[in-house]
Amino acid sequence: MSTTPIADLISPSALSAEARRSNAPLLICLPTVTADELQSLRDHILTALPGQQIFLATPGATASPDTGDGITLLDYTAAPHTRAGWALTAADFLAAAQLAAEYDAPATLLLGAEAASISPAALQQLADAVLTQKADLALPRYETGPHDALVSSALLYPLTNALFGTPTHLPLPLDAAFSSRMASRLATVARKPTAATPTEPLLWPVAEATIASFTVREVPAGHRTLPHPAETDLNTLLAEVIGSLFTDIEAKATFWQRARATIPAKPNLRPDPSTAEPEDITEMAETFRNAYTNLQEIWALVLPPQSLLGLKKVSRAPAEDFAMPADLWARTVYDFLLAYHLRTINRGHLLGALTPLYLAWVASHLRRSAGDAALAAFHVEETAAAFVAEKPYIVSRWRWPDRFNP
């Protein structure tokens, strides 16, 4: 981990003249925060963006004029959260976009829960990507450990990269920066009625930016406190997130079938997990073995015989050798995506049947990484590369599903 002081990373000279105080203000939208958190964020903003004109909006704040430091405090109505703020929703993007239009802000920085933990360096990177580098969408890449952001690592990042050609590691963002035209597009999408059951539908800004030929950047953002979902049932949480992503992928099939994927660059190391003690994955491996026995009928409706044979081999492996091959995982997810599209079985049952397969990937990931962040990163990129390699498989099955019936 870098030991470079924040003060050495942030300086007025690091910002272009365009990103300083000008006629182009930056709107920063915060979740509900305490007075101490607001003061901490204000200090971080002044450190990160000296001289920049800022509209700082937070629910319940007392509106105030610019007091000389370039920050004007605004009160606004943020989206009510039943998700405990672990991810930005369509309502969050809509509220921020409406405020950006009201104040004619060319760039917006929308922050999620635990926003006070964001470093000044991360704030500068996000703002600079939109204000100076003219990105339409900038998403942070926070430093995560082997146990963090596993749904993103196993599913969201590999699918987004392979199908939309945009390698963003956290495509269901906790924080985001975007241009005025991106704000307008997000607001339009957020207003569309959805058939999804949650009261707060998710929105996939990377896919929206990509199909509009907007510029997307992922910026290094260091460490941040990552809030956990209030929903503790994995089946419910995974079904909600993956169901939303599958629905979005289905709607954009015409685009991603001809889009080029980006081959991930693996970290520069030679993984040797045998040098470290593996994680205790016994419970997850046993869950998968039980599912292999009990879900055969459902999986047989979704997966071809070759994949079922591969899963059989995985189920028979002892914990110390337990591994979900990356290519098998990629094809399995693609087959579930197709079954979701074709409504092969009830979608709720389908997504529930994916959960033990996801746990098998997690068990494999923890065993491969052995608690080492570098090994974990290598396995994540290996997984993403497999989704890219197997993309022709899902394109063929999507176009001619009858030719590949299990």
Image: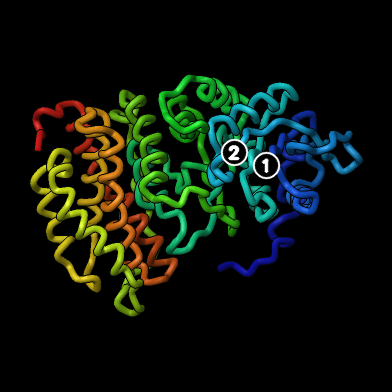
* Count of marks placed on residues: 2
- For badge 2, the amino acid type reads His
Please tell me in which quadrant of the rendered image residue 391 appears. top left
Q: Residue at x 51, y 49 (%)?
A: 229
As drawn, 57 above or below 13:
above
- For badge 1, the amino acid type reads Pro
What secondary structure is marked by label 2?
loop
Q: Residue at x 82, y 43 (%)?
A: 51
**To which residue does mark 2 refer?**
81
Q: Residues within 10 Å of mark 1 (few under 14, many from 20)?
A: many
Q: On the picture, is 139 further left or further right than 63?
A: left
Please tell me in which quadrant of the rendered image residue 274 appears. bottom left
Residue nearest the viewer, comparing 240 with 182: 240
Quadrant containing the C terminus is top left
Q: How far from the left and from the top, in percent, is residue 210?
A: 44, 31
Q: How far from the left and from the top, in percent, is residue 166?
A: 42, 39
Q: On the picture, is 169 further left or further right than 334?
A: right
Q: How far from the left and from the top, in percent, is residue 373?
A: 44, 66
Viewer-side label of 1, 2? 2
Residue nearest the viewer, comparing 213 with 75: 75
Residue nearest the viewer, comparing 304 with 293: 293
As drawn, 6 above or below 160:
below
Report, in whole angstroms, how far the alpha carbon at label 1 lies from the one at label 2.
10 Å
Task: State yes or no: discs 1 and 2 in contact (Cβ < 8 Å).
Answer: yes
Q: Residue at x 46, y 45 (%)?
A: 168
Q: Which mark is residue 31?
A: 1
Q: Residue furthest right?
A: 67
